[in-house]
Amino acid sequence: DAGVIQSPRHEVTEMGQEVTLRCKPISGHDYLFWYRQTMMRGLELLIYFNNNVPIDDSGMPEDRFSAKMPNASFSTLKIQPSEPRDSAVYFCASSLRPDAEAFFGQGTRLTVV
Amino acid sequence: AQSVTQLDSHVSVSEGTPVLLRCNYSSSYSPSLFWYVQHPNKGLQLLLKYTSAATLVKGINGFEAEFKKSETSFHLTKPSAHMSDAAEYFCVVRAGYSSASKIIFGSGTRLSIRP
């Protein structure tokens, strides 16, 4: 398996634009997580899914953020409209079982100017 | 509820000396515990994991961690530091007996190695 695949690797966008980040989890993994990493706040869990169903979205900062998982092999994190304070590295991760480790993608570095 | 506290934000050691990165956790259920490493501008790599088997866990690159339930600790150690160990280290807790099994990261410890 190629691991967790995220796209794009880098995204630069203007304030107010819509941004969509994409993630392909490892095949067979039932859990998918979205994290945001910044210098100020460290690694924050935004939302996670089990079997394509959102379980906990309490970490989603505002209504401008939304995440979907239409099938077991694809998830998106959307920011609309984007703001400069959304600039961060966004990681997607997946895991096989509720007690297992998570495997992380390489991240998407988002810059909002 | 679960949480994890990394007691040191920055640790600096000399090359060849022991490394100790401290982690305490809180969990309502028997937890799974992990250590991840992140090198500058890189992704997160699993170092080692504890999932209710042996309490002393060996990981990659010579790292070990010991699960101590009485102390709610899961400290990371290495007998002899190498320059390539300089990175950010994250202690992670997961209470994993249901579909509601989130993964919580500590705030991280930056490890610096002096020549």
Image (tube, rainbow, N blue to C red):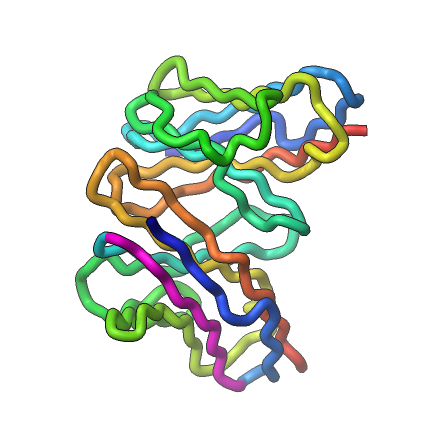
Residue B78, horizontal then vertical, whole percent: 43, 77
Q: Which quadrant is home to the C terminus of chain A?
A: top right
Q: Which quadrant is home to the N terminus of chain A?
A: top left
- B69 or B15, nearer to the observer: B69
Q: Quadrant of residue A110?
A: top right
Residue A55 appears left or right of A77: left
Taking the spot 59% from the left edge, 27% from the top edge, the residue there is A62
Q: Is residue B46 above or below residue A9?
A: below
Q: Is residue B12 magenta?
A: no
* Residue A34 visible within the image: no
Residue A111 appears left or right of A23: right
Residue B75 appears left or right of B41: left
In the image, which residues are magenta?
A: B17-28
Taken as a whole, is the magenta stretch helix, strand or loop? strand
Looking at the image, how many numbered discs can be counted on the residues? Answer: 0
Residue A25, horizontal then vertical, whole percent: 40, 29
Q: Quadrant of residue B93?
A: bottom left
Taking the spot 61% from the left edge, 84% from the top edge, the residue there is B14
Taking the spot 34% from the left edge, 59% from the top edge, the residue there is B26
Give the farthest residue toward the left.
B53
Q: Is residue B50 above or below residue B20?
A: above
- B115 or A16, nearer to the observer: A16
Taking the spot 20% from the left edge, 43% from the top edge, the residue there is B97
